[in-house]
Amino acid sequence: MRAVVIIGLLTSPLTACSGDDGQETSTTLADGVTTLAPASTTTPTTAETVAGTTEAPQDDTTVTSTSGPPLGLPLYEIAFRGQGETGDTVVVLLDPESYTTLSDLDLQDVIRDVYDQFPPVAFAHVVDIEDAVDLVVADRNSLTEEELTLLDQHYFARLEEGIRIVYVGPFDQYPIAILGS
C-alpha cells in the first residue's frame, strides 16, 4: 500500500474584506508614528482630539495637525530676586499656558535651569500665579487663611541652600530631591 500525500499551496495572498473600496489614508501622530486606516466613506461632522493631535474632516480623508503642548521646560520668569550672603533668593513664576501636565521632574528641571542660568541662587520658590509671588517670600505667620490657601494651591517647590528641592502644595507627596542628582 502506498500513501499519497497532497500538499496544497496557496498561490494568492489572503486579504481581508473591509467593505470599502480599499483606499487608505495615512495619519502621522505627534510622536512620529504613522498609521494607515481605510478612508472614511462619510465625513465626520466634528473634529476629534486624539493623543495630542486634532483630526479634522476634509472631503473623505483625515488631516492631522499637532496641537499639543511644546516640548521641554515649562516657560517661566524670575518674578522676584533678593540678594543674600550665600546667594540670591528668587521666585520663579511658571506660565500655566506652556504646559498641560506638570511633574516633580519638570519642577526639578525648572529649578536646575534657574540655578544654572541665573547664579548665584541659594533659594528658589516655584509658583504658577502672580498673586503667589509676594506671598511666598512673606512671613507665613502674617498671612491670612485665604492667602495660605492660595499658596497651598499654587506653590509647588522650593530650593533650599542651593541643593535641596522640597516639594510643597500639590506636590508635597514627593520626597526631597537633591539638585544635581
Image: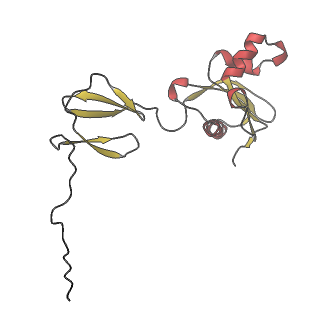
Instruction: Please tell me whether residue 172 is drawn above or below residue 112 in the rendered image.
Output: above
Give x and y (percent) for residue 111.
66, 36
Q: What colour scheme has been applied to the protein in the rendered image?
A: secondary structure
Question: Is 110 or 80 nearer to us in this picture?
Answer: 110
Tell me the quadrant of the picture where the N terminus can be found.
Answer: bottom left
Instruction: Please tell me whether residue 52 is drawn above or below residue 14 in the rendered image.
Output: above
Instruction: Please tell me whether residue 75 is drawn above or below residue 112 in the rendered image.
Output: above
Question: In screen coordinates, is 36 left or right of 164?
Answer: left
> Which residue ends up furthest to the right in the rendered image?
141
Which quadrant of the view contains residue 89? top right
Give x and y (percent) for residue 21.
14, 41
Residue at 83% across, 13% down: 142
| Total tally of numbered discs in the picture | 0
Instruction: Please tell me whether residue 168 is drawn above or below residue 179 in the rendered image.
Output: above
Question: In screen coordinates, is 120 left or right of 99?
Answer: right
Question: In screen coordinates, is 91 left or right of 39?
Answer: right
Which quadrant of the view contains residue 120? top right
Which quadrant of the view contains residue 41? top left
> Which residue ends up furthest to the bottom in the rendered image?
1
Give x and y (percent) for residue 61.
22, 34
Question: In screen coordinates, is 177 left or right of 73?
Answer: right
Give x and y (percent) for residue 13.
19, 60
Question: Is 42 or 53 nearer to us in this picture?
Answer: 42
Residue at 22% across, 27% down: 43
> Which residue ends up furthest to the front in the rendered image?
1
